Image (cartoon, rainbow, N blue to C red):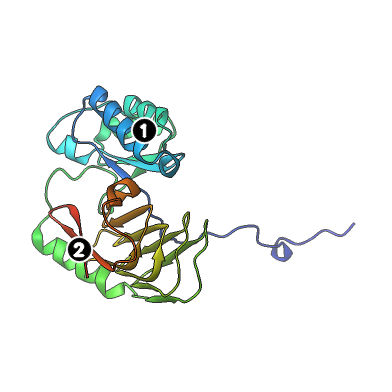
């Protein structure tokens, strides 16, 4: 029998950093009945889109007002509507412990697991931001082939698509998105939260468009005729869609 030395063993796994887009449910009220009703209305607009969707529960606005909500209750509620919660952020110490007790991760805010109820010093924020910006690599991406259903494309800078984005496909960019064919799938610009991002589209037939997390679904876009170029931007926390 040949005994294989530890150094000769094949590597079975590796860890890599990645960029993922996960919707966050920002709670503004602890009223579970109201949350239940509004979730039902939202899911009813696009049941297939929200089905088994990952969801991050954001508690920081409630905690900033010292309004408490039980983690177990809100997690059970979102699961009833078909969401798959992947953790909480902005929780207080008690809420963080509640989440960990049910094997739910506690996500950080600005690099900390505890909620930031006090604003950090302005100089510290500016300095930290400058370091992040200096280390970010902007990578624009050009796609000349059709993006088919089920495909996902991510760009660290701007994303330019000169072909069709099919229904069921998803394109995402940290910067702007330009689609010079028909957009029938989902387009998410400014996925890291940049409110200055834009979407430019020659033929808007999308299932969803989003800028910095603010989105509109297909039913919301029904009033915009296809085959007319549009410019989509963020204005007063609402998507502004204009003909070009």
Q: Nearer the viewer, residue 3 or 216?
A: 216
> x, y percentage for residue 10?
70, 62
Assign the N terminus to one quadrant of the image: bottom right
Assign the C terminus to one quadrant of the image: bottom left
Q: Which residue is mark 1?
A: 99
Relative to 28, 228 lies left or right: right
Q: Which residue is mark 2?
A: 242
**C-alpha distance separating marks 1 and 2:** 43 Å
> Would you call the spot at circle 2 few (<14 residues within 10 Å), some (14-19), or many (20 or more)?
few
In the rendered image, the vertical position of residue 193 relative to residue 146, given as above or below:
above
Asked whether the beta carbons under mark 1 and mark 2 sit within 8 Å of each other, the answer is no
Residue 4's label in the rendered image is none
Residue at the left extreme, as displayed: 122
Q: Residue at x 45, y 61 (%)?
A: 17
Mark 1 vs mark 2: in front: 2
Say which quarter of the image contains residue 84. Answer: top left
> x, y percentage for residue 157?
34, 72
> x, y percentage for residue 58?
27, 41
Residue 198 appears in the rendering: no
Say which quarter of the image contains residue 64. Answer: top left
């Amino acid at each position: 029998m040949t005994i294989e030395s530890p150094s000769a063993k094949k590597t079975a796994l590796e860890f890599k950093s990645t960029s993922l887009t996960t919707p966050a449910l920002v709670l503004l009220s602890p009223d579970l009945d109201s949350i239940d009703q509004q979730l039902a209305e939202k899911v009813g607009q696009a049941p297939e889109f929200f089905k088994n969707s990952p969801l991050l529960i954001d508690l920081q606005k409630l905690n900033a007002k010292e309004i408490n909500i039980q983690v177990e209750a809100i997690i059970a509620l979102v699961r009833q509507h078909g969401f798959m919660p992947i953790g909480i952020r902005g929780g207080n110490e008690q809420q963080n412990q509640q989440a960990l007790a049910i094997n739910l991760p506690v996500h950080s805010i600005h690099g900390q697991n505890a909620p930031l109820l006090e604003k950090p010093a302005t100089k510290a924020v500016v300095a930290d931001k400058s370091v992040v910006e200096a280390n970010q690599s902007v990578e624009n991406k050009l796609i000349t082939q059709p993006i088919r259903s089920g495909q996902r494309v991510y760009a660290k800078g701007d994303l330019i698509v000169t072909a069709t984005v099919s229904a069921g496909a998803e394109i995402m960019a940290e910067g702007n998105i330009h689609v010079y064919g028909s957009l029938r799938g989902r387009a998410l610009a400014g996925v890291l939260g940049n409110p200055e991002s834009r979407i430019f589209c020659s033929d808007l037939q999308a299932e969803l468009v989003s800028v910095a997390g603010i989105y509109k679904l297909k039913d919301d876009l029904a009033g915009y005729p296809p085959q007319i170029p549009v410019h989509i931007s963020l204005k007063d926390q609402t998507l502004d869609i204009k003909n070009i």
